[in-house]
Image (cartoon, rainbow, N blue to C red):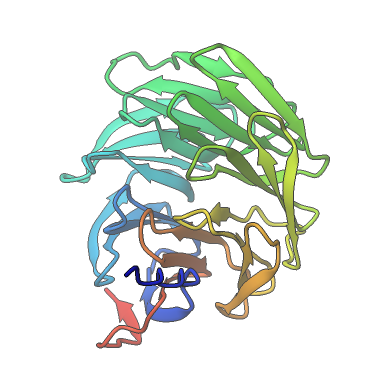
Amino acid sequence: MAFPQPRPQAPQLPQHLLRTIDCQQGAVRAVRFNIDGNYLLSCGSDKSLKLWSASRGTLLKTYSGHGYEVLDADGSYDNSQICSCSSDKTVILWDVATGQVTRKLRGHAGKVNCVQFNEEATVILSGSIDGTVRCWDTRSRRYEPIQVLDEARDSISSLKVAQHELLTGSVDGRVRRYDLRMGQLHVDFISSPITCVCFSQDGQCTLSSSLDSTLRLLDKSTGEMLGEYTGHKMKGYKLDCCLSSKDTHVLSCSEDGHVYCWDLVEGSLSLKLPVGKAVVQSLSFHPTETCLLTAMEGRVQVWGAEQEEMEEDVIAT
């Protein structure tokens, strides 16, 4: 006799505030999980980059070396290196353990908005207000980029790397996908300045947010629009969007102090998370678990699907 299969549970959403971290580094410009979600990086307007334990909210290391506010950061696959970018026009490669600057990369003509390692951490890709993406070899002693992608007609606001593909979003209203293996460029015109782009976890779709307060999900290979997500406010700030770890939901920051979370397939609003009264500047979804990071003013909030046993209000270090 066969038993009926248990009903599939509705995906849980990170709606419980687990802890708030007072980062003490001015306004937090970006918050990022590392590759396995055990650590988080916060980028500060006071020129510092900080590494925290995600589960405890304790400060592990402070990285100082930028000359102006830090705008983005990424951790390498083995957690040994961090890359960061800043309004000081530089990209820095850091040694995680020592906190020392391994390389300081100069070449962009203006502030650098976004930065990411490739999967092997052999290349750093950086996107700037100067309209270029520069590719830097982390193992070489040369200080020039190995490649410059200058197709954009305005500032590069966001970039993501997945295997042999690079996705960029620009203020010129275009999402560009570079197939680095084939040497091909695919362009989707959105018409409104792009603030953030990302790949879906399955690699089949691209998500972009733009200043018309709309997120768009596109089929990667055909460019067909699969979904539009609205309701949040994004008119003047460069704010993040992302997909949940299992591609079930689409999330976006908003200028009204909330994080909006939509059902990917239905397009309906599943959750409007009240973070605070200011602009939600940045967010990051855990790579495997139902856990979300948000940044507002000088603090980072950690959200989970269920309340934890021990609650602490604000952790300051």
Position of residue 285 in the picture relative to residue 263 (left or right): left
Relative to 177, is 255 above or below?
A: below
Q: Residue at x 40, y 71 (%)?
A: 4
Q: Tell me, yes or no, if residue 70 can be seen here.
A: yes
- Which image quarter holds the N terminus? bottom left
Q: Quadrant of the C terminus?
A: bottom left
Say which residue appears at 49% left-offset and 58% top-offset: 244
Q: Residue at x 61, y 61 (%)?
A: 252
- Let me know if residue 107 appears in the view: no
**Above or below — where is 113 with respect to 267?**
above
Residue 121 % position (x, y): 31, 30
Q: Measured along the vertical axis of the image, is residue 163 above or below residue 194? A: above
Q: Nearer the viewer, residue 259 or 228?
A: 228
Q: How many marks?
A: 0
- The spot of residue 104 in percent (x, y) is 36, 30
Where is residue 73, by image quadrant? top left
Identify the residue at horizontal 22%, vertical 46% (top origin): 99
Between 274 and 144, the residue placed more toward the observer is: 274
Q: Position of residue 203 (x, y in %)?
A: 51, 37
